[in-house]
Image (cartoon, coloured by chain):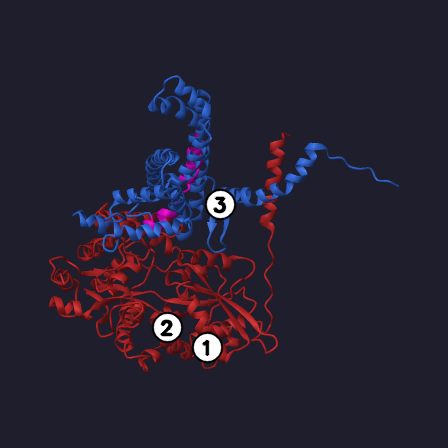
Amino acid sequence: MIGKRVRLGEPGTAWLFLTPALVLLAGMLLYPVFYTVWVSLSDFDLATFQPSGWVGLRNYELVLKDPGFLESLKVTGIYLVIALPLQMVLGFAIAFLLNVEWRGRGVLRALFLVPMVVAPVVAGGVWRMLLDPLWGVVNYTLGLVGIGPIEWIGDPTLAMASVIIIDTWRWTPFVVLIAAAGIMALPGEVYEAARSDGAGRWQTLRHVTLPLLVPVMAAAFIVRWLGAVKMFDIALAATRGGPGNSTNVLNLYIYEKGFRSLEFGSASSMATIVLIVTMLLTIVLFRVSHRLENRW
Amino acid sequence: MPRIIRLAAATSAIGLALTACGSPAEEVAADGGGLGSDGSPVSIRVIANDAFAKQWQDQLVPEFNKKYPNIKVTVDGVPYNDQLAKSMLELTGTTATYDAVLADDPWLPQLAKTGALYDLKGSELAKWNDPDYDWADFSPTPLAAGQWDGKQYSVPVRSNLLLMFYNKSLYKKAGVKEPDQNTTWEQYFADAKKLVQDTDGDGKTDSWAVGTYFTKDPLTPTIWQTVLNSNGGRLLDDKMQVTFNDANGVKALQTQVDLLKYAPPGASTYQFNEPLEAFRQGKTATMFMWGSVFKGTAVDKESTTLTPDEVGITTMPAGTAGPGAHRGIWSAGISKKSTHPAAAWTWLQWVTSKEGEQFVAKEFGTFPARNSTLDGEPPADWAKPVYAALKSGYEVVSKNEMWRPRLPESDAVQQILALQTSQAISGQATAQEAVQRAADEITGLLKSKGYGQ
């Protein structure tokens, strides 16, 4: 007897092949998210290290009244508003420079990759040493011209500047890479046409290059935004969020609430709020980026 | 049903099924897993701090194996910041990865509350007790770190106290009398002005009075907590109500803020390594630091520029209730989920026996918890004055209850204190404001955890 052959068809085969990935995704991605939301709505019992009684939105109410959380929102906002545009502008400017033929640009291009391969905690620690007022080379150099010593990490305002400098040092090369790839992919004939029409360098940049690069800029910005919004390792290694709360970015605050204070209910509520806000802002950014692409 | 809902339902079901995965706890054999034999050794695992885990694995375990060759011990080092959460997960999980768990001083109530640690003086472990194990020989101060709720859940393996180190050469150069246990905070600050000095005559200050914890760290408030205790104050009373939001608390925090005036540039970021390095390089005349660093600071040539003759050690300056010190004891307990409690308890008894303690005191410079070691022949000449300071420290610590809060929420309390201390040190708040905010936040925290406030 010959058994009837089961034909899954194209959608069935596709689902069959997708199943292992979906199971993995469910286990590795969805489960932690569900668990975090569950903990955020429960009382976390330290004796069993498990969520116990249902408390509804009580943890969320406490978190929204927590001055530390509100301050860390503000700190994260300041960091994002300064660091992201700075890295974008620097990244594209350096990419334009590297696009021009000059001797040694290959070496410089390779050197630009170094910060990206340094672990963030190591970067934070090394910069902490470089910026030390007593032993650091930065203050030593400034001291030669009569400046300082400057409390880079100890002063609340300068500490934020230092975190932004370290983060910019580490992530600008990433923007440079994306920008350089985008610039190299620009069609040559458009430039020939612009030249034929008598466009100067500035006009070509303003009316040809930048509009053509908008999709690349938007993609780079969104990728950097997603990376920047979860930043905490550099702040942890360089300043530990201090002095006071001056560099206590959201994720560092959540980490300390969860893993140092073992306040898992509050930490999970904060994480859930951050997840929702980040998702909403990312959707907005995607829409803006689409509009910009269509405009040019 | 729309496809997306079916997909979400399926993935949720898988997620929930995963939570149900887990194996039941293994049964402990009547012989506690035994002590192993030549052909069939037993293995135990210890979760320790990465600062000393390797040292233990490389030197302490081989020494133990001379007496107990059939107990194989693996010591896993975990970074300090991750150790409490990892230990909690370990003790509340269904199966045991670790047979013995190490705890820093304030963590024990939290770990004991899980119910997963043996009472070391209780009946469950009694059948594997070493008859020569002398509990009465322990100094009560370090031993108390392992007690909670009337039971002995752990025993000291690395004793420590916050003490004052001083550089005798820098004191001499400044023409200042060396400090002792009678030196008061007033005298200390009067001396500190002279200890900020230009030692090489080039017109620039190159040596400062003090280095200690100033950055945002849970250990930073231990400095002003010690000042508070040495003036007779406490953080919390027996009912777990805040008692430091008064003039005494403000004065104590202000003392730490004022110390920064006499510290090197950049000292506001000092955690553990920075003040240690500054002192070892001869840049600071005093250092409020854990006494256990003495060997690396005064003896070991590869880590210090100083010699034992140059380094003095004593209790921290005195307040109205006496000199200061602060307890920081690492202790170890046995997990009830261990399938080898006999081997684990045998190992722990040996490590904390007179023999084991003298070995670690000699080889690693670890501070002892036993009176017989403290009063006996010191392992080296340098240890004589250090043990004397340690004994004085143990006395004042017990007298004025100089330790971090003993409750399961200890780390959360310490985090709040760390933030507010940092606010005061960096000038973002006055000492009064910082103390009041810390008091309010701690009261709120403890209230939410069911403590009557």
Q: Which residue is mark 3?
A: A39
Give how far across and how far down residue B451 sits, in percent: 38, 52
| Near-viewer residue (A99 or A103) | A103
For mark 2, what is the residue? B364
Q: Three-letter amino acid code at disc 2? A: Phe
Of the pair B396 and A220, the residue shown nearer to us: A220
Give the structural element (helix, strand or loop) at label 3: helix
| Cα distance in 3D space between marks 1 and 3 | 45 Å
User: Which quadrant would residue A178 be assigned to in this image?
Assistant: top left
Query: Hue of chain B?
Result: red
Give above or below for B354 relative to B4.
below
> Is the residue at mark 2 from the same chain as the one at mark 3?
no
Range drawn in magenta: A218-240
Q: Residue B335, position in %: x, y? A: 50, 65
Query: Quarter-wise, where is residue B185 in the image?
Result: bottom left
Q: Which percent across, then down, holds residue A64?
A: 38, 38
> Which secondary structure type mostly characterizes the magenta part of the structure?
helix
Per the model, the C-alpha gap separating discs 2 and 1 is 13 Å
Determine the chain carrying the residue at label 2: B
Residue shown at the point (45%, 38%) measured from the top left: A275
Q: Identify residue type, mark 1.
A: Glu
Is B367 within the magenta? Answer: no
Q: Nearer the viewer, residue B99 or A229?
A: A229
Q: Toward the viewer: B119 or A248?
A: A248
Residue at mark 2 to residue at mark 3: CA–CA distance: 43 Å
- Residue pointed to by mark 1: B63
Is A186 on the left-hand or right-hand side of B7?
left
